[in-house]
Image (cartoon, grey):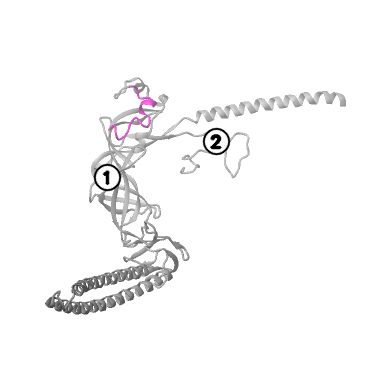
Amino acid sequence: MLKIMQKIMPRRVGIIMLAAGVLTVIVVGGWLFRSKGNSEPAFQTAQVKRGDLVPTISATGTVEPKQVVDVGAQVAGIITAFGKDKFGNAIDYGSVVEKGTVLAKIDDSLYAAALETAKAQVQQAEANKISADANVLQTRATLLKAKADWDRAQKIGPSDALAQTVYDQYQATYEVAKANVAAAEAAVEQAKAAIDQAKASLTSAATNLDYCTIKSPVEGIIVDRRVNIGQTMVSSLSAPSLFLIATDLKRIQIWVSVNESDVGSISKGQPVTFTVDAYPGEIFEGRVAKVRLNATQTQNVVTYTVEVETPNDNAALLPYLTANVQFKIGHLHDVLLVPNAALRWSPRPDQIAAEPRRAPHPHGGSPNRESVGPGTIGMSHKHGIIWAEQGKFVRPVNVNVGLTDGTVTEVEGDGVIEGMRVVVGEHTAAPSEEQMPLTPQMGGQRQGQEGPGGQGGPGGGR
């Protein structure tokens, strides 16, 4: 009996395993077929609406103080100390300073010594001047004596009473005395010039000593501190930068880089709105102050810098924030509007209704994916295609494309009417949204639970 059972059992096990395999294939195949059947795309649509449009030009810029002063050092030396700000705190980032506030001090030992040397040189020059004046008096006295002797010699003349050699000697002495007076007077002028030179050196030494104390040239706030105590400053051809001071953060600017194709639509006084990432959802306003003429070219793209002024009374806008700017270039009333996504979306050939698929395209070619895909319609061409839902298919509607505010675009055309539903995208129910059969149910979910947007799914109603 045991031998018989041992022969029968392997057969039964094989039959059971084969039946289980067939059942699994049938169930999984049916589930795959069902999933494939449910993967038909569902078009996401939006209505063509009529309303007002404020077209804008979008660009990116940087928040900049209206006036920035770069404070440097004109002498070399070691930073020994920082000054005090308006509130008595050491100078640092964000310190509020008045005009003339001491920002930092440089070691002045060498410059103080140079000043004392210059003072001594002035005193020496003044003493030389006194000596030169005295020498003039002395040479003039010698000249008087030589002139008197020469006058007597001329009265007597060369004779037995006055030898010719003596006569000539009186004349030479007189001429030498006159030359000595002229030389003495020139020495006085030279001494005066030496005094002026010494005083100029004294002024230079005093100025260099004063430069060791770095003072704020304007009233404002410290935006950047670029030195530390103990750091050696070396002043060569250009003064090293120590501090960056913004004069008034209640009036700031935004330097916006605008493409050359858009700069023609921007003018002085034009209204501007912008946002910054530091304050999401908050919209700031300003006006165009200037369009700079010094264009920049990067990779064959030419851009111009546009200055936008905006009030900042609460000091919320900090320097160097990135601003997303919108230039308002007009205001359109009562126009047909479609979402920008409707102009970007393009269907597959098998999604296009039969008649439009066979009909020739008004702009040449047929309305297939290649001719209406992204990049073939746009603002520069002034024409485009939107796709209207027609059952399980879509049909093309040719439109003239107008201005945009970055979200919706003005369109017009014979086939466009208010309330018309146009396709902006599509979503497909992925197989992963349904649970595999014969798998345990987790978290109370039921087999066949509907996907997103359906009853019981995320976003679905009851």
Q: Residues within 10 Å of mark 2 (few under 14, many from 20)?
A: few
Residue pointed to by mark 1: 54
Distance from Cα at disc 2 to Cα at disc 1: 43 Å
Instruction: Point out the stretch of residues depicted in magenta.
Output: 365-381
Q: Earlier in the sequence, mark 2 or mark 1?
A: 1
| SS assignment for the magenta stretch, majority | loop
367 lies above or below 45? above
Secondary structure under tag 2 reads helix
Along the line of sight, the residue nearer the viewer: 383 or 247: 247
Please say if 345 is above or below 264.
Answer: above
In the structure shown, which secondary structural element does the residue marked by tag 1 occupy? loop
Amino acid on which disc 1 is placed: Val
Judge from the rendering whether residue 279 lies leftward or rightward of residue 2; answer left or right: left
The answer to whether residue 280 of the structure is visible from this angle is yes
Quadrant where the N terminus sits is top right
Residue 65 location, quadrant:
bottom left
- 32 displayed left or right of 410: right
Q: Residues within 10 Å of mark 1 (few under 14, many from 20)?
A: some
The magenta stretch spans residue 390: no
- Residue 74, given in percent of the width and then of the height, sits at 37, 63
Residue that mark 2 sits on: 432
Report whether residue 99 is seen. Answer: no
Q: Residue at x 32, y 60 (%)?
A: 312
Name the spot of residue 202 as percent of width and height, x first. 33, 71
Q: Amino acid at mark 2?
A: Ser
Q: Is residue 42 above or below residue 77?
A: above
Residue at (28, 52) in percent of width and height: 308
